[in-house]
Amino acid sequence: MTRTFLGMPATAPKGVGQLRGAEPFPAAARRALADAQLRRNLGHATATIRAKSGAVIGEVPDWEQLRAAGSAIKADVLARLPELLEQLEAQVTAAGGVVHWAADANEANAIVVDLVRATGSDRVIKVKSMATQEIGLNEAFESAGIVPVETDLAELIVQLGDDRPSHILVPAIHRNRAEIREIFLRAMPGVDPALTDEPAVLAAAARRFLRQAFLSTPVAVSGANFAVAETGTLAVVESEGNGRMCLTLPETLITVMGVEKVVPAWRDLDVFLQLLPRASTGERMNPYTSMWTGVTPGDGPQEFHLVLLDNGRSAVLADEVGRQALHCIRCSACLNVCPVYERTGGHAYGSVYPGPIGAVLSPQLTGVADNASLPYASSLCGACYDACPVKINIPELLVHLRDQAPHPPGESAVMAAAAYAMDHPALFAAAQRATRLRRLTGRRGQALPPPLSGWTAGRDLPDPPTQTFRQWWASR
Amino acid sequence: MTAREVILARLRAALDTAAPLPVEVPRDYRRDGPADLDRLVDRLTDYRAHVHQVAEAEVADTIAGIVPAAASIVVPPGLPPAWLPPTVTVLPDDDLDNARIAAADAVVTAAAVAIADTGTVVLDGSSDQGRRVLSLLPDLHICVVHTAQVVATVPAALARLTPRRPLTWISGPSATSDIELTRVEGVHGPRTLHVILLP
């Protein structure tokens, strides 16, 4: 491998992490659509969160100014990413932290596993983090004989249920209260057998179960919502207090963040701390936000490691159109408004990043060939663009990526034939007459024969008009 | 080549292939406004915090009305002693271990800033607020805020805060919406939050 090659933008490696599904979206979606319980759970949850979010966004008179500022800050971050990361590294180091760089998932997992081993602990408590799911950190821990304990309630439900997360913000959105009670009764050690399915009772069971882990585990792993280059400050937003526990109680804290999470200045939090909670949980402010800069003597972890992760982000950055997917602040507003996500749920997307943002981010992180069906997992209705607090033009990205996805071999032949016919008036008129034959075939004629049947697998062929424009013109 | 060099080279190469234009960030959003106490109370209450508007001389009586008699209360070193009722057992934080903090009935702290728009109090680890763990493990948190500490907006709060300090932004008690998007107050952090608002 040459030095030049090493330094070129690279996609995320295969065989590690959770960015690639086992099957294409249409196959996975078909199975999800057949699950009536799943569709009820999703419909209820997404409608609830849309209403909450809409109400608190309506309270903010300058929401559009905040969106514009958020979008511009993120564009500025990408334009200056290398220098901002160097500045962040210098500030974190000056404040007593240690910065590590991981070119891909394998490197990141190895760094974190080694850091945990160095503490001597065989257990680690975790704050919900998309980056660590992306790289498959829990699997790496298990291979190394380290037990990862997910402390976010939804992540705990997913972990105890031996399940996969299906939403960025509410990973157990596909489970209802009765199913969660079943999972706790089956898999939570020491749970009260008289557990009811009241959400408050289920939350109290998780509180009791995790308290001891919080107080006795010497090392935690978190993600980061924001990292301020100017000050070296990291920020984690959360609701339950499990984040505060992990960020405060252990002796060692390891934070894994994608390189795009850096923001230039302290005042940039003006914008994101307003956009994120209202767009994601539909709250004016999430219950808890923790900010820390390196190590504070006498308060919280006395050893802090920050792992900066590429894992395909440099490849996304190299695409002039596609790079706006790196603006994402993981609020999941686009999932909640998407008519496709609302019906299929998150598992159908294969990657840890589901929904509209997943359909544009996952294929870019892996290379489009490895997630070729995802750019088509959309009706291009545009609701995601309207909902995005940092104005990512997801429909534009979907079309851009469809261009790059491998096309069926017959497609170019059909297009060439169509172009030839349109170039020859007599042939075109004959073709138009031929379409009228289909009027005689009735409903069966609404599908095309192979090799064109793929086009009509999910849609009816439109009825041809009784008269073409040319015929009408000739008869005037 | 170290991973650091690899990543920085990759990012620079990515930007070289299609160099972005310099970006001007529009900052015409609201920076500040009148600090509306009624709004703060409304927002705190909406997220299930209990609010008491009293004079400073009444803080001890107010706390006595919140906690059970003979309650054990964790207290950061710089908290004004006059705020504490004589009926309680005070546990000053002289490096208390986590088990003792967790076993206490309540914690009383001051605050650094409060935000009216969002119903948020921010602690910054000053001596009247203490280490982060103090306000985390007890099940009841009583937070005393002066009117002069109340600002209207998130940008105004950030402008008053010092990034180098460990900051905890608190908006209501600990909560989750992870089960069917139903909000449940009280998971791992304090399940009850009282805010005492002084003139």
Image: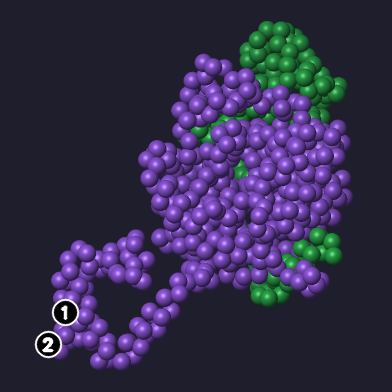
Q: CA distance from mark 1 to mark 2?
A: 10 Å
Q: Colour of chain A?
A: purple
From the viewer's perspective, tell me whether residue A371 is left or right of residue A466: right
- Please, what secondary structure does the residue beneath circle 1 have? loop
Whether residue B161 can be seen here = no
Give the vertical position of A452 relative to B59 (above or below).
below
The answer to which of B174 and A351 lies nearer the viewer is: A351
A97 or A107: which is nearer to us?
A107
Residue type indicated by callout 1: Gln
Asked if badge 1 and badge 2 are on a common chain, one would say: yes
Outermost residue toward the front in this view: A450
Residue A215 x %, y % = 75, 26
Looking at the image, residue A375 sits to the left or right of residue A89; the answer is left
Name the secondary structure under disc 2: helix
Query: What is the number of the mark on residue A467?
Result: 1
- Residue A344 seen anywhere in this rendered image of the structure: yes
Q: Chain of mark 1?
A: A
Image quarter (top left, top right, bottom left or bottom right) of the C terminus of chain A: bottom left
Identify the mark at residue A475; answer none if there is no mark.
2
Q: Is residue A107 above or below residue B52?
A: below
